[in-house]
Amino acid sequence: MQSDTQDQSAARHFYDRISHAYDLLADADEHEARERSLKLLAAKPGEAVLEIGFGTGHSLVALARAVGSTGNVCGVDISEGMRKVAEERLQKEGTSPTIDLRVAAVPPLPWPDASFDAVTLSFTLELFPPGDIPRVLSEIKRVLKSGGRLSLASMAKVATGESESMLERTYQWMHQHFPHIVDCRPIDAVSLLRNNGFEIKAEERMTIWTMPVTVVLAAPEKMTPDS
Ligand SMILES: C[S@@+](CC[C@H](N)C(=O)[O-])C[C@H]1O[C@@H](n2cnc3c(N)ncnc32)[C@H](O)[C@@H]1O
């Protein structure tokens, strides 16, 4: 088993501590973006789907219902506390028997190549140290089947033409000065995806308390004979 980096150890402890309070702290603000991301993903009966950073398990329930008894839902999260909360939700909703939940630090992803039709993450890509994001995206490409797709919701940077967000600047500053308290920071998910071999299929923008949020559907670029 690989040992945690300092960032991973901090994330594990932080999310273990807040796992029972997470929905109270964040869900009222974040659920709309998360649901829009799942709508773009449009998981279908019989598909195999992975969620990275499943948190308290809301999306796992929706995904399990979408893929049905012929499908397969897997999830990976660094926090054992989050796994327990998610497992309780899945049991309450009657969806747990079909779901494979793993506690592990990403990257890497603990599944073989070409395991999934679709991968999704919400408010998680922006938590990885910038240097790890290309590896996370490369792992997602590796576990996607040919023709597979990725959806994500993340805190975003202000785009050209949008008004400046005080909250975004506050997050940037807090993340820079107090990374142990504010682990996330706004990212340019679309550029990160494009620069790491994904084609953007759809993008929606929204705001949470003036903070820009992006919801994206993407797919690995098709390899041409010259690439
Ligand atoms: C901000 S929460 C979002 C949870 C959920 N996706 C949602 O939208 O409600 C981020 C989640 O990612 C998990 N996480 C953070 N760093 C991780 C890592 N390196 N590997 C796997 N999971 C990680 C946390 O434990 C937490 O559950």
Image: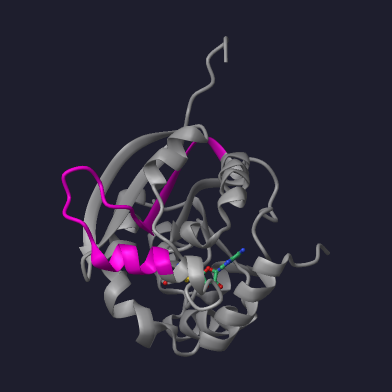
Q: Is residue 170 left or right of residue 73?
A: left
- Look at the image and say whether residue 135 sits in the magenta stretch: no
Q: Which residues are magenta?
A: 145-173
Residue at image point 60% right, 41% down:
138
- Magenta segment includes 153: yes
Q: Residue at x 35, y 57 (%)?
A: 38
Q: Which residue does the image show at 66% across and 68% down from the upper left? A: 8
Q: Residue 140, position in %: x, y?
A: 57, 46
Front residue of this view, candidates 155 and 107: 155
**Residue 221, above or below 188:** above
Residue drawn 57% across and 40% down? 141
User: Residue 61 occupies which quadrant of the picture?
Assistant: bottom left
Point out residue 226 in the picture as x, y percentages from the top left corner: 57, 10
Outermost residue to the right = 1
The C terminus appears in which quarter of the rendering?
top right
Which quadrant would residue 173 be assigned to in this image? bottom left
Q: Where is residue 166 drawn, in percent x and y? A: 25, 66
